[in-house]
Amino acid sequence: MGDCFATATASILRRTGAEYSDSRGAGLRAFGQQLQLNLLNGRAKVKTYRVAIVGLGRMGSTIDDEGHTTLPYSVASATTASSRLELVAGCDLVAEKRERFTDRWGVQAVYEDMRKMVEAERPDLVAVCTRAAGTDQREAPSANYRVDLHADLTVELANMGVSMLYVEKAMACSMRRADEIRAAIQKNNCALNTGVLRRFDNRYEPVRDVVLGGRLGEVKAAIHYAASSLLHGHIHSMDTLSWLLGDPAIDRVRGQFDDADYVIEDNHVASDPRATYQLRFAGGVDAWSLPAAHWEFEILGTDGGVRSFNNGTSSQLRLATEGGGWEEVPLAPVTPTSTVVSCLEDLVNSLEAGQMTRGHVEITHQITQACLGVAESHRQGGRWLKPAEVAPDLYVFHI
Ligand SMILES: NC(=O)c1ccc[n+]([C@@H]2O[C@H](COP(=O)([O-])OP(=O)(O)OC[C@H]3O[C@@H](n4cnc5c(N)ncnc54)[C@H](O)[C@@H]3O)[C@@H](O)[C@H]2O)c1
């Protein structure tokens, strides 16, 4: 409690600009004790954090209109729904998007240039909600096109000293840029989560609890069901498999594009390929992606299996019986909460507690590497490879 409280207090002091010379010193302890007293007396206000959004399109501002969910989905609506966050600014290259954002969210501070916005507004949290490769096209405009806007913005924002970043997936188009992001995030001690939102979806928590609580016995296999593109879609499927298994290291990856004859030239894949893959996690669990069904996940062990159906809508647990076979065991129903609110608030909670975020940069780097590993494996005839064997400059265009 003491250390945790000291970390949280140090963080509050840092964010509020209060001075302290020694994070474990008497002044800090006194401040902490006073703050604790105030909190107990209900006098201290919960600190809110200033949020700015780069890219005022669907994910930044308007996706709530599309009917995917009744819960807050765009970063703007999730920010507005959270008592820990305050929407203060937005940035888009397109004037009309900026005007619509102001009309919709009542935020006057809108900018064309991200750097100017950050310098003027000093946000605590910036959400990168542009397309990954910086274009609305589904295909790279030329064989030399290597724009990686998520990576550019993430590195720049971390180096500008922004404390918390929400970055849309996938965070990079190549491992060279993913390495750069990891270095910038770590150097600047920045808290990062990316938009792989099933990790923040409470409907998957009972499934994960069953797996990590040992109810399936020894876990043997994990399956993702759905046809999908690689960097746009499988970044989600791999992340969810990893999350459900407790984020073990990935030892090996293999895979291939649906277009088995596709030849990768000059380290360049011009459009996000549909693909299937296999992952071998540390500890011996193998995972497969099967290109059918509607975003389902299944984990199978020696003593049972658990499956999440229909994009998280429901789940089923089956456990071995004494008489042999597996029988269904009811799982408590879950009332869903907003994944984007959870993701953004996880940044705040992690910052305050001085702890890793749920989707921290190491795990995001690992999943990006596994995803790009599928392209590398395709190039090498579908062989198993270690994730570190991915060519650093292998670029996969995606949106
Ligand atoms: N996690 C999810 O569930 C989810 C859902 C939807 C979209 N996304 C992701 O969000 C990202 C954005 O997708 P979208 O559908 O919202 O795109 P969009 O085209 O609707 O919005 C992107 C906006 O970014 C702006 N922009 C481009 N470059 C910019 C720059 N340098 N500075 C400022 N603004 C810039 C564009 O003008 C546009 O308004 C994509 O990576 C997509 O995969 C994720």
Image (tube, rainbow, N blue to C red):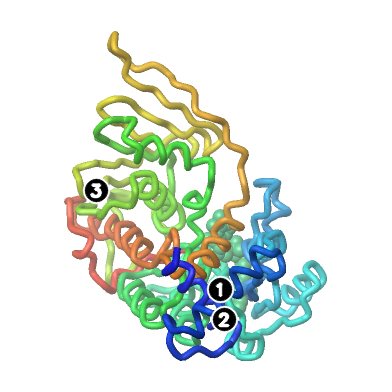
Tell which quarter ligand 1 is in. bottom right
- Contact? badges 1 and 2 (CB < 8 Å): no
Q: Earlier in the sequence, mark 1 or mark 2?
A: 2
Give the residue number, with chain letter if any, for mark 3: 281
- Report whether 273 appears left or right of 72: left
In this view, 154 is above or below 262: below
Secondary structure of the residue carrying numbered label 1: helix
Identified by mark 1, the residue type is Gln
User: Which residue does the image show at 69% across and 64% down from the upper left?
Assistant: 41
Q: Is mark 3 within 8 Å of ligand 1?
A: no
Looking at the image, residue 362 sits to the left or right of residue 164; the answer is left
First in sequence: mark 3 or mark 2?
2
- Dot 3 amino acid type: Phe
Q: Which residue is mark 2?
A: 15
Q: Answer above or below: position of 299 versus 374.
A: above
Q: CA distance from mark 3 to mark 1?
A: 45 Å
- Labelled pair 3, 1 in contact (Cβ < 8 Å): no
